[in-house]
Amino acid sequence: MELTKDLGERLAEGGYRLIIVDSIMALFRVDYSGRGELSERQQKLAQFLAQLTRMAEEFNVNVFP
């Protein structure tokens, strides 16, 4: 996911202590609309949250989704 790649690069530069994700579902509603794509959207959301968790641990930052 492009967003987490860019975020990882910024975190590697240092100086960050907190990540706030405003309206996390809005990021996924655009690409996955309708009940037919609910399962895929939930999987992508879970992957995104797992990546945020790994970054939080790796770079010692707090995440507020």
Image: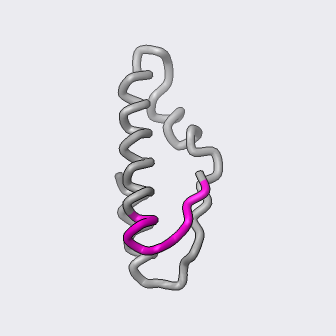
Magenta highlight range: 55-64
Asked if residue 34 is among those painted magenta in the image, a careful observer would answer no
Q: Is residue 55 above or below residue 46?
A: below
Task: Pick whichever, 46 or 24, lies toward us.
Answer: 46
| Image mark count | 0
Residue depicted at x 64% and y 51%: 22
Task: Pick whichever, 16 or 29, lies toward us.
Answer: 16
Residue depicted at x 53% and y 84%: 15
Residue depicted at x 36% and y 63%: 5
Residue located farthest toward the top when viewing the structure as drawn: 36
Residue depicted at x 37% and y 56%: 2
Q: Is residue 26 above or below residue 22?
A: above
- Image coordinates of residue 25 in percent, x first then y, are 56, 38
- Image coordinates of residue 31 in percent, x first then y, are 45, 34
- How are the residues colored? one colour
Q: Is residue 24 above or below residue 34?
A: below
- Image coordinates of residue 61 in percent, x first then y, are 51, 71
Task: Pick whichever, 42 or 60, lies toward us.
Answer: 60
Task: Pick whichever, 39 or 64, lies toward us.
Answer: 64
Q: Is residue 1 above or below residue 20?
A: above
Q: Is 60 left or right of 58, judged from the image as shown? A: right
